[in-house]
Image (cartoon, rainbow, N blue to C red):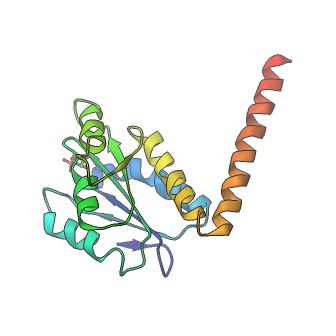
Amino acid sequence: MKIMEDKPLVGIVMGSSSDIEIMEEAAKVLKEFGIPYEMTIASAHRSPKRTTEYAKSAVERGLEIIIAGAGSAAHLAGVIASETILPIIGVPIDSSPLRGLDSLLSTVQMPAGIPVATMAIGKTGARNAGIFAAEILATKHPEILEKLINYRRRMAENIEKEAKKLEG
Ligand code: RP5
């Protein structure tokens, strides 16, 4: 397990080492916002015990949110959600011949009672998972709120610049 700081607030979990390239996008955002996180691999079907232990110990280890990314029949986020009351953000990964549609449906279509906040497929979803985690944390961490406000302002300024360039 890669611990970025003493006390990670966000756990990033993925089903396979083949998911790292995608899930790094979530990590990049958390780094940008200075949010401590940890990253690990746990598979809902290949290592179910490790997965449930990770979820069950999350609160006592100080995590406040878990981002879970998986491909194919992606039950990782749902299984983790069933073992903790922390909010779970799911990232469907486009690693199968169905290009992520399978993981999108299996992540988003949670039966009533155990929600998973599901993002878009692939790198965009992983990046948004990082931003969404920051937004949840911002409700109680004012320094993260300030960074998010600045991030939004910079995005809007970039659009203004691009528009001016296009309009001539
Ligand atoms: C899922 O199966 C993983 O999340 C990954 O996206 C997919 C393929 O895994 P590998 O066969 O590449 O390990 O569990």
**Residue at x 44% of width, y 54% of height:** 24
Residue nearest the viewer, comparing 80 with 69: 80
Residue nearest the viewer, comparing 114 with 36: 114
103 up-or-down from 38: above or below: above
User: Could you tell me residue 17's position as x and y percent?
Assistant: 28, 55
Label count reads 0
Query: Quadrant location of residue 2?
Result: bottom left
Q: Is residue 22 visible?
A: yes
**Residue at x 21% of width, y 41% of height:** 72
User: Could you tell me residue 3's position as x and y percent?
Assistant: 43, 74
Residue nearest the viewer, comparing 1 with 124: 124
In the displayed structure image, the side of residue 45 where residue 108 appears, left or right: right
**Residue at x 50% of width, y 46% of height:** 128
User: Could you tell me residue 11's position as x and y percent?
Assistant: 40, 66
Quarter containing the N terminus:
bottom left
Q: Is residue 15 visible?
A: no
**Residue at x 47% of width, y 40% of height:** 124
User: Could you tell me residue 156's position as x and y percent?
Assistant: 74, 38
Q: Residue furthest right?
A: 168
Quarter containing the C terminus:
top right
Q: Residue furthest top?
A: 167
57 up-or-down from 83: above or below: below
Query: Quadrant location of residue 109?
Result: top left
Query: Quadrant location of residue 15?
Result: bottom left
